[in-house]
Image (spheres, grey):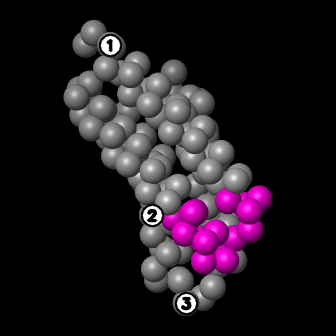
Amino acid sequence: MKIEEMEVFKKSHELVLYTYKISKDLPDEERFTLISQMRRSSASIATNLVEGDSRYSKKEYEYFLKIAIGSCAELRYQYLLCHDLGYINFDEKIRAFDLCKDTMNLLVCTKKSVEARND
């Protein structure tokens, strides 16, 4: 199965798109700080997933999945920060948290699946 057809990729891509949508409305003063970091964190999830899938060894794939998991946790915090700074409302935060949680669960399941493979 192609990585783009997997639920973990679809959900991580949805999270990237949501992050870009939300971050375009953040204050201009955050353009080179929080906005940039949120976009990099979100894109890192899907990017590392794709890069890991393209590797030939299980160990390398697991490495890239660990990075994706870390980026997802980082992004969740950045959404909390946005909410606490008053940049996003409660509903936007909850939507972001739900996307992060779903993405994280799928990443962890993918990592466990890769670990269980016999290469």
Q: Which residue is mark 3?
A: 29
**Residue range (magenta):** 78-93
> Which one is closest to the eye, mark 3 or mark 1?
3
Q: Which mark is residue 40?
A: 2
> Which one is closest to the eye, mark 2 or mark 3?
3
Q: Is the magenta region chiefly helix, strand or loop?
A: helix
Q: CA distance from mark 1 to mark 2?
A: 30 Å
Q: CA distance from mark 3 to mark 1?
A: 47 Å
Q: Amino acid at mark 1?
A: Arg
Residue 112 location (% of width, % of height): 38, 22
Q: Which residue lies at the image location 26% right of the left edge and 24% below the top edge?
A: 58
Residue 119 location (% of width, % of height): 25, 13
Task: State yes or no: residue 29 in magenta.
Answer: no
Q: Which residue is mark 1?
A: 117
Which SS class for mark 2?
helix
Counting residues from the start of the chain, the first of labels 3 and 1 encountered is 3
